[in-house]
Structure formats: C-alpha cells, structure tokens
Image (tube, rainbow, N blue to C red):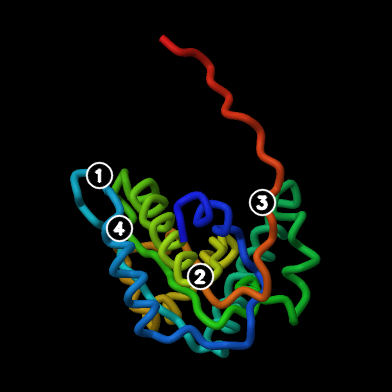
Amino acid sequence: MDFKTLLRNRRAIREFQDREVPLDIVKEILQDTCLAPTASNGQPCRFIIIQNRKYLKKLSDESKKNFLADIAANNQSPLTKYEEYLRDENFSVFYNAPCAVFFIGPKNLPSAEVDTALTVAYFMFSATSRGLGTCWIGLGANIRSRQILDEMGITEEDEIIAPIIVGYPISIPEPSERHAPDIVKVI
C-alpha cells in the first residue's frame, strides 16, 4: 500500500467483522508504534491490550456510568449530546470491536498527550497497512473505579490517554470532504 492510499484508508472505523485480531499482529503493530517521535525520546506510552469482549463491555458500562454522572452534575455539559447513547444498555462505547488498546502515560508529564497522539498515529497507520481499522474512543477513557484500574494495571501515577479500538472493518468509508490548507502566512 503506497502512502497516499494509506492516508485515504485510515478512517475512523466503528463497524467490524466478527473476527478476532491475532495477538501477534497487535504486538507487531505496537512494535511499529514505538518508532513514533516523542519529546526528548522519552517514549512514555505504555499499552494495555484487551481482547476480551465481556471485559470491554464492563469498561464501556463503567465509562457510560461516569459520563452520565457528569451530565447529571452539569446539564450544560457538551456531553449531553451523547446522553441518549449512554443510557442505551446495548450501546458499547467501543462499538463491539474485537480488540482495544489503551495507551497510558504518566499523569504529570507535560508532553504526555502530544507524545501519545503521535504514537497513536503510528499505531493507526501500522494497523491500516495490515488491513485493520481503528478509532480513537474518547468516551472509553472515563474509567474511575480503582478496582478496574488496578485490574488493568494502571497505577495511581498513570492515566488513560487514548483508548483505540482495532479490528477488521466491514467497509472503509470514503474520506469526508476536506478543506484546503489554511495557510495564514508565508514569511
């Protein structure tokens, strides 16, 4: 797959074939992911691979519960647009994906979000090159139960930065219309 095709095929995928992603392929993708640039080459991202659909449902339920509590506490929250979905017991924030990889990093590292975003991009491109689809699931990061965080191996010093679902897509949508680069100035 040439680079232009890779860019066109890297779409947010939310519908997957009922097919598992082999762990060795996920590990290969993570190996590629570690080539991403990070501040001072700190490579702060660590990964939690979840291939258990029942456990993903548990995480989805926990995240939905916490978002609904946030909405109840602040009915002006921008999250209210998701409330109907969050109340639907059949809705999975992970879109019933066969696999999710949680990118975690240190809470107190100023570059953690940027480092993770770059690392996630490498993950997504590597997955796409193997015929897999991905999507960053912001709604899946709202895990607050200390018991669940401990089960996942997330310490008090770390946080979930990016839950990424991965699987074999049912289809790859065409890219939505994009505007031309908005170049403010050339000096």
Is 39 on the left or on the right of 176, as rendered?
A: left
Give the answer, above or below, for where 36 lies relative to 180.
Answer: below
The residue at which mark 4 appears reads as 106
> Judging from the image, what secondary structure is the residue with disc 1 in?
helix
> What SS does tag 2 mark?
loop
The type of residue carrying mark 1 is: Ala
Percent across and percent down for residue 33 are 33, 62
Sequence-first disc among 3 and 2: 2
Residue at mark 1: 39
Q: Which residue is mark 2?
A: 143
Q: Quadrant of residue 137?
A: bottom right
Q: Nearer the viewer, mark 1 or mark 4?
A: 1
Query: Could you give the CA–CA distance between mark 2 and mark 1, rounded to whole angstroms?
Result: 27 Å
Q: Residues within 10 Å of mark 3 (few under 14, many from 20)?
A: few
Q: Position of residue 158 (x, y in %)?
A: 33, 63
Image side of residue 115 versus residue 53, left or right? left
Q: Is residue 171 above or below residue 122?
A: below
Q: Name the residue located 39 percent from the left edge and 65 percent from the top edge.
A: 103
Q: Mark 3 highlights which residue?
A: 175
Mark 3 belongs to which amino acid?
Pro
Choose between 77 and 86: the one closer to the eye. 86
For marks 1 and 4 on the same chain, the one whose residue lies earlier in the sequence: 1
